[in-house]
Image (tube, coloured by chain):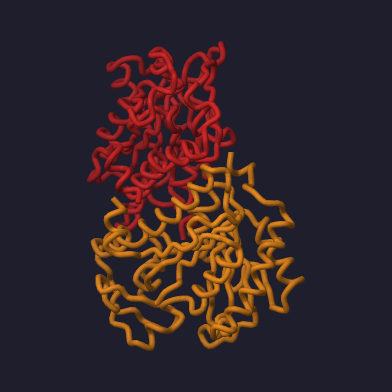
Chain colours: A red, B orange
């Protein structure tokens, strides 16, 4: 049932599907595309290009990491304001009425039928596609390490954020702890655990749905988006973070967290 | 991509899809059907009808509870020996080489390609169908209570089991605790928590994958299969357990565990 929808509306971009490396890269907020089927939600062009609509720079960084680490990449093809794929269907933030200082007119007082339509057209096919990539690797003895790639705005509600790299985890901190240690050792970034958000803020839905049930090692990377402002900056960040992920995996030893996976 | 497979091999039976009650019933081991695409795994007819192939009585009980509680039912349409839908693709038990005292010749030394084929043809479409039913209800403000229905053999490795009703939970024991209390109060069954199995034995995969990430209340019911031996026995068990589930829900108050769901 999800197949037909995915064909008519390509909500998922998958690259490097046959890659053989140990990581699987996810980018839920890759795009600020507003598909015709859902309209532009009453937003100005300025709002549609702001950080509320997507994570600027995150897709290019995710693609760079995918290439550098020989990892598949599963990315969304539409704005988080139509459906935020890192939120469950019953979360207010899945189809937010307001984001930071912006109202989202097209999400105000959404009818149940519209929430259902977006859930079936966007949420289910995206997570089915990601689930399929993970299950294929589990079935063939290659449990992937899940890395979700995000960016955040340097100024939020008027406050400047000092953190440059946020390292966030769901239930199991093992891999994130190793990533933080290697990022501090190998980069000059201001790196912090579970900043500017943490699982308690509901930002680890993808990890909770797709990594934690399988006991897969995982991390959510949050990069301040002024450090991803152009192609050169993204390339430098890719060159900085790919070795961090590889070193973190070497530090903990590869493979599934067997205790949780059974 | 799962849609085409699901059409050619109907691995899922969904009934009462438009039901309006608070429960969603799942029966992963409903059938001892061996689809032609996978053969009979070298098993005798006797082995194919034994408890290793399915949970005898579980489907009829699940269907009875679905009717009594106005709940959708999602059930598998093939033997657990082809793929055990309550196990992840990398678990040995997903395509078991041996089950209790039986060897499963068709599962011996499975090639990676065959593990992948069964994962894509069976595991992914079943869990996509269940995920869709859950997500539809979340999107429309009706978070379901997930009830998986199983049966177990009274004699296992030659040992008789006294427990008659096992009440099992994944991470959150809230609903299972209420079910156990109501079952003790309302039935004459020998009821026990996390017997004859528990999450530590890897038997809560469906709940871990589909209920826990959403903070949904859940329980796995394990009924000793000599108590489901014929239609009259199943009807009596249905009449006994439907009020237990309803009373347990009333006891805890309906709805999602908001703390975990965000």
Query: Residue A182 appears at what percent x and percent y?
Result: 42, 32
- Count the marks: how many? 0
Determine whether, in the image, residue A158 is placed left or right of residue A250.
right
Residue A242 visible (yes or no)? no
Q: Residue B257, image x and y in percent?
A: 64, 47
Question: Which residue appears farthest toward the right when viewing the image?
Answer: B185
Residue visible at 28% across and 71% down in the picture: B109
Task: Pick the quarter of the image with the C terminus of chain B.
Answer: top right
Residue shown at 45% from the left, 72% from the top = B30
Q: Nearer the viewer, residue B23 or B196?
A: B23
What is the quadrant of residue A47 in the picture? top left
The residue lying toward the viewer, choosing from B118 and A141, is: B118
Residue B103 drawn at (x, y percent)? 36, 81
Residue shown at 47%/41% (left/top)?
A116
Q: Position of residue A236 (x, y in %)?
A: 31, 20
Q: Is residue A48 above or below residue A217?
A: above
Residue A198 visible from this viewpoint: yes
Q: Nearer the viewer, residue B137 or B166?
A: B137
Q: Is residue A65 left or right of residue B13?
A: left
Please tell me whether residue A109 is drawn above or below residue A101 in the rendered image. below
Left or right: B27 in relation to B223: left
């Amino acid at each position: 049932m999800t197949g037909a929808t995915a064909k008519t509306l390509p909500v998922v971009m998958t690259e490097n599907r046959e890659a053989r490396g140990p990581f699987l890269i996810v980018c839920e907020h890759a795009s600020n595309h507003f598909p015709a089927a859902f309209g532009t939600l009453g937003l100005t062009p300025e709002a549609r290009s702001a950080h509320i609509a997507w994570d600027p720079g995150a897709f290019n960084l995710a693609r760079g990491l995918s290439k550098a680490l020989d990892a598949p990449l599963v990315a969304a093809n539409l704005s988080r304001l139509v459906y935020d794929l890192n939120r469950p269907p019953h979360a207010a933030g899945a189809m937010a009425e307001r984001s930071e200082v912006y109202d989202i007119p097209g999400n105000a007082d959404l009818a149940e039928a519209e929430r259902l339509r977006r859930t079936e057209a966007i949420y289910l096919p995206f997570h089915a596609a990601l689930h399929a990539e993970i299950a294929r690797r589990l079935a063939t003895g290659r449990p992937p390490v899940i890395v979700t790639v995000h960016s955040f705005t340097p100024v939020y509600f008027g406050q400047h954020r000092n953190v440059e790299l946020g390292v966030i985890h769901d239930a199991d901190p093992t891999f994130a702890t190793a990533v933080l240690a290697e990022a501090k050792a190998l980069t000059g970034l201001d790196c912090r655990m579970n900043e500017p958000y943490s699982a308690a803020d509901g930002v680890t839905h993808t990890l909770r749905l797709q990594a934690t049930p399988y006991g897969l090692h995982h991390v959510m990377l949050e990069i301040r988006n002024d450090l991803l402002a152009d192609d050169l900056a993204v390339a430098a960040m890719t060159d900085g973070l790919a070795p961090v992920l590889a070193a973190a995996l070497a530090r903990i030893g590869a493979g599934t967290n067997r205790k949780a996976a059974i």
